[in-house]
Image (tube, grey):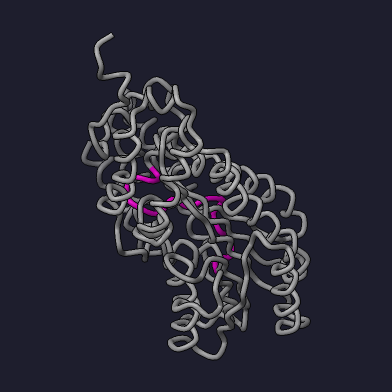
Amino acid sequence: MWLCLAITAVLGGTILHKLKTPGQLGKKVVYLAGLWGGACLLSLSLFGGLIFLALSCFLIYNYFSGQALLPVDQKAVLITGSDSGIGHALCKYLDEVGFTVFAAVLNENGSGAEELRRTCSRRLSVLQLDITDPEQIKEAHSKVVEKVQNRGLWAVINNAGIIGFPADGELIPMTEYKRCMAVNFFGAVEVTKAFLPLLRKSKGRLVNVSSMAGGVPMEMLAAYGSSKAALTMFSAIMRQELSKWGVKVSVIQPGGFKTNISGTSDMWDKLEKNILDHLSPDVQQDYGQDYILKLRNFLRFLNMHSKSDMSPVLLDIWHAVSAEHPFAFYAPGRGSYLFLCLASFFPAGIIDYCLKKMPKFGKTMPSALIKPN
């Protein structure tokens, strides 16, 4: 037993010491080392357990130790959704480490764009880019080509996204489903297609920012989660197809972080009114207006349980852009990696039970479910 623990500690420590990469790799190594150590201790054969442990740690070491970071070397990256949130912070971060950054914003005259111009180096360029507007995509592409010339574009980071107004899937209007798909999926696909020739030229990186909700079924997020699930699958397919061109594709599936994706109170009022206007009388009666008017509490609940420190996301995206052998997917944030693994490998009944036991934003029930028959 003590021999198993000692070997686990030594090999795990050696791997951690060897790794010099950003992001959540260190935690994963600790988890894996602990897993193999436990398997060794539970093994019926001490010798067999030791062999299993040694081989596992050797494979882990070889996999993770190949994560050397490439030099920046005037590499250019395009980041969509840079007005605020993750995209805004990422522009500052990658600019600080030496990348040439194209910050694509929804409003080039907005406060977010002005702050980037004021605080970042001259390497950063602000581009007007509504990713749902094909003409703006073409114009942004022309400006990028003009600046990078023969160097190509090293990375495209599809970060722009919206969450819409969280509600039961039956209550969400089709306009909201289409809006989420237009921004979170079709916009990312169109930007990717426009800039792929530049990525193939540089043998660069495509990084798509999805969400934990794209792999874990979460109530109130039918429109958002479905669009992010589509983006995750698109990323997986593009990873296979672009490998022959030398382009590496990664998908980021963060947990809860405080960003401006949920929008403003005025926007909530409009989306709430949109829901009420599109409901049939019988559906509105079954759910009740009180239930619908309390749905916005879910957004407050998300903000309360989200982390303001976005460094785990920034470090993982930096690794996806900079590592010699980036991972296919990253899951920064508390519980994101665990829930994605559970949703992938456990039976649906167990996942549903676990999610029902999670803290809820409120105990409100639809009107028809609380009234006596």
Image quadrant where residue 361 sits: top left
Main secondary structure of the magenta stretch: loop
Residue 204: x percent and y percent?
A: 67, 67
Residue 161's spot in the image, x, y percent? 52, 56
Which residue shows up at 60% across the image and 77% down it? Answer: 102
Q: Give the side of residue 317 with respect to residue 2, left or right.
A: right
Q: Is residue 82 magenta?
A: no
Number of marks present in the image shown: 0
Query: In the image shown, does 305 or 291 lie closer to the viewer?
Result: 291
- Residue 292 visible in rendering: yes
**Extreme-bottom residue of the structure:** 122
Q: Residue at x 77, y 54 (%)?
A: 244
Viewer-closest of 261 and 15: 261
Q: Along the line of sight, which residue is nearer the eye, 49 or 197?
A: 197
Query: What's the residue at 44%, 34% (across, down)?
Result: 217
Q: Quadrant of the C terminus?
A: top left
Q: Is the residue 111 above or below the residue 52 in the image?
A: below
The percent position of residue 259, horizontal first and vertical second, equals 38, 61
Q: What segment carries the magenta color?
A: 322-337
- Residue 112, position as x, y percentages in the image: 45, 76
| Residue at point 32%, 19% (across, down) | 368
| Relative to 333, residue 70 above or below | below
Q: State left or right for residue 255 relative to residue 73.
A: left
* Residue 55 shows in this picture: no
**In terms of depth relative to the viewer, which is nearer, 70 or 221?**
221
Residue 81, above or below 60: below
Q: Quadrant of the N terminus?
A: top left
- Quarter assignment of residue 293: top left
Q: Is residue 284 left or right of residue 318?
A: left
Q: Relative to 15, is 93 above or below? A: below
